[in-house]
Image (cartoon, grey):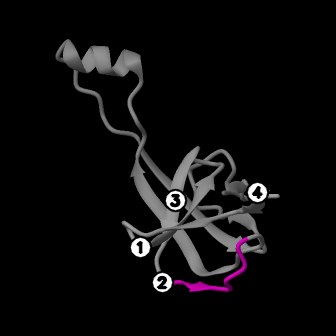
Amino acid sequence: MSKQNRLFWQDDIEQWVFQCVGCECLHGFTRQWTFNGNMQKPTVMPSIIVRGTEGITDDEHKRIMDGEKIDPKPFVCHFFIRDGKMIYLEDSTRALKGQTVDIPLWEEV
């Protein structure tokens, strides 16, 4: 029987990695954060903040290729990880701001 965890260690970048429901992609943290070591119910201190720009749509790509200028759309994903849950903070620009959701499980083989 396999054991399911909410995050995993990625050696090549030396980070704990997990799926972010709000961004629908992977986020991570290094050993600089305090981590309780519980793979099923992780708690991490301090909060994690990810800033970037949204990916472009196919339509925006076509418009860029046609010479149109498209301004990047910035995003902020700011959250705490407590007991296996992501607590999205109010300064997040994601749809889940102010909500608490479980970190999805990864199957460990």
Q: Is residue 91 magenta?
A: no
| Residue labelled with disc 2 | 31
Q: In the depicted view, which residue is nearer to us: 47 or 1? A: 1
Going from N to C along the chain, the mark reached first, 1 or 2, is 1
User: Is residue 80 found left or right of 57 in the rendered image?
Assistant: right
Kindly identify the residue that appears in the image at 38 percent across and 15 percent down: 59
Q: Is residue 105 above or below residue 55?
A: below
Secondary structure beneath label 2? loop
Gap between marks 1 and 2 measured at Cα: 8 Å
User: Is residue 45 found left or right of 74 in the rendered image?
Assistant: right
| Residue labelled with disc 4 | 99
Question: Which percent across, then down, holds residue 85?
Answer: 75, 65
Gap between marks 3 and 2 measured at Cα: 14 Å
Q: Amino acid at mark 2?
A: Arg
Going from N to C along the chain, the mark reached first, 4 or 3, is 3
Question: Which percent across, then down, holds residue 64?
Answer: 24, 20
| Residue labelled with disc 1 | 14
- Label 3 neighbour load within 10 Å: few <14, some 14-19, many 20+: some
- Label 2 neighbour load within 10 Å: few <14, some 14-19, many 20+: few
Instruction: Please say if the residues under marks 1 and 2 sit with CB atoms less than 8 Å apart.
Output: yes
Where does the C terminus fall, quadrant-wise?
Answer: bottom right
Gap between marks 2 and 4 measured at Cα: 26 Å
Question: Which percent across, then down, holds residue 79?
Answer: 62, 66
Secondary structure beneath label 4? loop
Q: In the depicted view, which residue is nearer to us: 77 or 25? A: 25
| Residue labelled with disc 3 | 27
Q: Amino acid at mark 3?
A: His
Q: Is residue 37 magenta?
A: yes
Task: Provide the residue span drawn in magenta.
Answer: 32-39
Instruction: Please say if the residues under marks 3 and 1 sit with CB atoms less than 8 Å apart.
Output: no
